[in-house]
Amino acid sequence: MIEELLKKYNLKVTDKRVELLNTIVDLNENASIKNILSKSKDMDKTTVYRNLESLEKSGLLTREISGSDIIYLINGHHKHHLTCTKCHESVEIECPFDKQEELNGFTITNHYLNIEGVCNKCQKK
């Protein structure tokens, strides 16, 4: 599956890229730099950063801001959350941009969405 994804995005299939993408898949929504580096023992920091950058530029990866972390996801598998700034509870929401190809004359190529607020429980306290 990973090899096919790399080929779909016209990227060279290398052991490091396959390992990195498998790590991102395994980590799912927890694929932050810190977590990727801790699971990728065979790769140095430079290799991880260089590959993340090239995979993102190709469109295969997207990154999202989750609290204070940047999370990497395989394109098409991204999720957005509402996060309470008091109790830090997080609720997944549907992406408002997935079905939109254009916005105000701009062709959407990537997006990040981080919504914070105060949940109902914390508002009642």
Image (tube, rainbow, N blue to C red):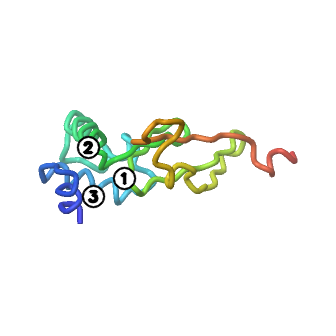
In-front residue for pair 112/109: 109
Which residue is located at x 38 percent, y 41 percent? 34
How many C-alpha atoms fall within 10 Å of the one at disc 1: few (<14), some, or many (≥20)?
some
Which residue is located at x 54 percent, y 36 percent? 104
Q: CA distance from mark 3 to mark 2?
A: 17 Å
| Image position, residue 120 (x, y; %) | 80, 50
| Image position, residue 61 (x, y; %) | 33, 47
Read off the residue under disc 2.
58
Under mark 2, the amino acid is Ser
State the SS at label 3: helix
Q: Quadrant of the N terminus?
A: bottom left
State the SS at label 2: helix
User: Which residue is the extreme one toward the top?
Assistant: 46
Read off the residue under disc 3.
22
Read off the residue under disc 1.
75
Under mark 1, the amino acid is Asn
In-front residue for pair 70/108: 108
Q: CA distance from mark 1 to mark 2?
A: 10 Å
